[in-house]
Structures are given as C-alpha cells and as structure tokens.
Amino acid sequence: MNINEKIINQDIEREIEKDLLIFNQFMESLKIKIGYKNDFYFLCDLFNRNLIEKIEVNALQIKEMWLDYIKNVEKDHTFQLYIGIPYCYSKCAYCIYHMGVAKDKELEEYAKKLINSIIFFQDVLRKIKFNCCYFGGGTPSLLEEQDLFEIMKIISKSTQFVEGAEKTFECNPQSTTYEKLKIAKEFGFNRVSFGVQSFSRDVLNKINRGYQTKEMVRNCIDWSKRLEFQEIAIDLIIGLYGDSEETFLESFNKAVELKPNKIYLYICQPPKEYLRFYFDNSWEKYNKHFKTLTKKLPEIYKIAEEADYIREDKLKFIDPTQVGAILFNLRTSPIIKHCYTGMQITEKISVFGLGHHVNSCIYETAIYHSTPLEIDPEKNIYNLTMFSKKEQMQFFILNSLENYPRYYIDKIKFRKLFGIELEKVFEDAILKLKILKKIQITHDKIFYLPKENKEKFLYALFFIGRDKIVESLKNYAKPSIFF
Ligand code: SF4
C-alpha cells in the first residue's frame, strides 16, 4: 500500500466510525420510540415507517393515481387485491395488527363504509385483471352473514380475475358458520385459512382466545371439505405464553389429524405489551420459552413427514428466529397458480387495498395506508409515500437482506428492475461494508455476512446512508403516524 492509499483508507475508516456512531444512536432512539427489541428489527417496516416522508391525500387523488397507472402498465403486471376487516372477537395477547373489538353496530357500519368504498373505486377495479384476492383482517368471518354476502357480492360485481387466481377467506373458527363458508364458495373463493393458534384450552385462555373449542375447528375443516375449497389451511403459533413442549406438540398432532392441505406454524413476533405482561418485559425470558418449544421441532417435522406433509423450505435446519412461518404442505394438495404475496418491492406487484388501516402499493409509484373509512368515500384519507427511485432501490436491498435463509442482494435482478448497476448507485456503502468485511461480492451477488439480527440491522443502514439517518434522528421526537 502506498502512502496515498494509506491516507485514503484512514479517511474512509474515520467516515465509517462516524457512520456507526450515528447508526447506533438511531437504533437506541428506535427502541425508545417504538419499543423494538434488540433481536427484532424489521428493516423494510422500519424504512417505511420512520425514514420516508408521508403526505395525506384523499380518495379522489388515489383514484386518479390508479387510473393513470393502469393506462400504461405492462400487460402481464401482477395486481393483487386485499380487503380488510379490522375487527376481532377479542384482542389476542400477541396481536401486532391494527384491529379493534367491535362495539354495538360498529361492524355493521364498517361493512357499509367498505361497500361504499368498493363502489367508489369500481371504475378502477373493473379495469384491472387481478391475480389474486385476500379477504383478511382482523377477522372477516366475524361479519354477519348478510353483510358478508353484500360485501362479497359487490367484490364479485366489481372485479375480474385471471384463471387460477387464489381467493382467500380468512376465518376464526369461533365465528365461522357453514353458511358463511357457503357464501364465500358461491362467490368464487377457493381458499380458506383458519387461525387456530393452539388446541390447548389452557393456552387459549391465557392468550385471550379462550372461546375457541376443538369442535369449532373440526366443524370448520369438515364444512370446508364438504364445500370443496381447493385449499384449507390451519395456522398455529410457536411462542405462545403458557404453551409447553407437550401442549405445543399436541396442537400440531391435532392439526395433522384434521388433514388440512396446509399447516402454517407462525413464529410469534412479540409486541412490547406481550413481553411486558407475560415475560416481565424481558426479551431473554421470552427467548428461553421460545427455545424450549423449538426443541419439539424435529419431532414435529417427523410427524409431518409421516402424515405426508412436505416442508416447502426443504432446509435441513431452520432457524425459527429468522423466519415468519414454517409451512407444511400436504403432498397431494392441488396447487393454486397465483398466490397472494402482499407488498413485495422485489417483484413487479401492485396491491390494491380496501378497508381501514390497509396498505396498498402502486408499483414504482407509491405506497399508501388508509386511515379509518368514512361513510362518504370521497372523504377517506390516505397516508401516501411517493417513492423516489433511490428509495425504491433501498427498499429492494433491505427486502433482500431480510430474505431468510439467503442473505444476499441479487445484482442481476437489481439491474433488471432499475436498469443500472447496483455498485454504481451504492458505491460508498459497498466500499465501507467491504472494509468492514461484512459483505462478499461475486459476479452476480453480494452476500451479506452479519448473522445476528442486531448486527444485520446495523450494517444495513449503510445502504440508507448517514444523511438520512441524521435527518430522522432530528425528527424522531415527532410521533410516527402509525402509532
Ligand atoms: S385474530 Fe389476529 S388480528 Fe385478531 S386479535 Fe387475534 S392476532 Fe390480532
């Protein structure tokens, strides 16, 4: 190394030190602001909530944006439809969603507002050929049969779908009836998903879902089979307070006995209230509990295999702290062609969301979040983020770095999506991370080496850049609009 190179390197090292100082401060500030725990940072979520400016727009402006967008969109662009019911029978202890418990006529009124909103957007919706639809929440099965019928009728009148489109109706066994499932089937829904979480009465009581019984779940599965839904899914959760190795294993066994096409074993993402209430606000205590339950995973994999379920990930070893869910697929299940994926900046997908507190994405243009609906749909307000090209690229990178188990950025995909070389746009970040030995570069990929969640989060901030983080630190006293 000659003298000049040495000076340049020293300069960069000083810059890195400054960066790290600010990034660490930023992480501390987030902990205070929104209670993120050391081990649970969500990069894209954080980026969207805390680092990008948002503006308020009305429903007419949103409509115009969509109309403009679909005029020039590529023929094979993927459109997904999401309809949200943000109400539940009770609030589960671990819930991280925006939902409420409906009082008096609240749910009925919400159904009217939602219908008005669908009618308002009808002229946009009718111009789109959707690839799939997800009717979720909250709990859509909580709707009265008549309201459910009216909502599904208006959806069906206002939308068209490609062949083989997945249409999911999300249900809670407690509020599901044969009639409701029949309505969904009649309006073309081909997939039902039941949030069961656990079969243990004791665990369900502890997490505020004590009203659900095994008979309810059994009925739901039997009715769905009778109605010939193409896909029937059961959701369970690992990490519930009160669950033991035995009850956890028993729940999985019971789910297998009912033979749904799919079993999702979701990883509990504990919100701060959950930790405070059940685990003395101690992440370590929660982690210990979680790890105890994961000891049963090898047994669970064996049971699944013997019952002819295959694991989609096909990994020999899976780190449950790094994934959202473990999916078990019945080998003989029919395959639905176009599945709902939600917002994915790494793919060319637009999501049209309808309802309270629902996210939408107009690909390469904007993302927005609806505030509570009004009875007059023109008065609806949305928090909108116009993505700059650079921000889309940053979102792409953060999304790639979250993608367990392959922590890498695909340079070819980046070039295809944005028409420019990754190294050109993020030259500074890549150089610093290389010096820090946090990345490894090949001809088509950049492998991201940090393993611990906290480290992964910290070093990813190099792609966002010090300026943006400093700006955010200045504003961090302002409350985030989502909280
Ligand atoms: S059913 Fe789902 S959305 Fe409703 S409270 Fe429970 S976790 Fe939250």
Image (tube, rainbow, N blue to C red):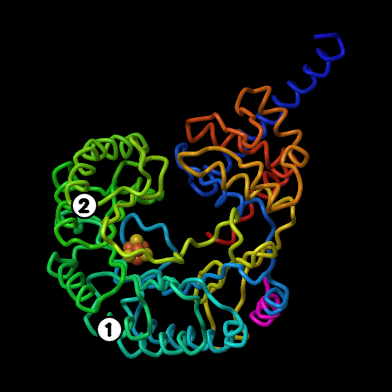
| Rendered view: 17 above or below 272 | above
Residue drawn at 13 percent across, 44 percent down = 246
**Location of the N terminus (image quadrant):** top right
- Label 2: which secondary element: loop
Residue drawn at 69 percent across, 58 percent down = 53
Residue 319 left/right relative to 63? left
> Taken as a whole, is the magenta stretch helix, strand or loop?
helix
Magenta stretch bounds: 56-66
- Label 1: which secondary element: helix
Camera-nearest residue between 147 and 399 = 399
* Tag shown at residue 182: 1
The x, y position of residue 95, in whole percent, is: 37, 58
Camera-nearest residue between 63 and 74 = 74
Residue 125 left/right relative to 113? right
Camera-nearest residue between 438 and 47 = 438
The x, y position of residue 43, in whole percent, is: 56, 46
The x, y position of residue 457, in whole percent, is: 55, 37
Q: Which residue is mark 2?
A: 308
Residue 476 left/right relative to 246? right
Residue drawn at 34 percent across, 84 percent down = 104
Q: Amino acid at mark 2?
A: Asp
Kindly indicate the quadrant of the structure image that contains residue 463: top right
Tell whether circle 1 marks a residue whose Cβ is less than 8 angstroms from ligand 1. Answer: no
Front disc: 1 or 2: 2
Q: Quadrant of ligand 1?
A: bottom left
The tag earlier along the polypeptide, 1 or 2, is 1
| Rendered view: 102 above or below 146 | above
| Rendered view: 276 above or below 389 | above
Residue 343, magenta (yes or no): no
Question: Cα distance, mark 1 to mark 2?
Answer: 28 Å
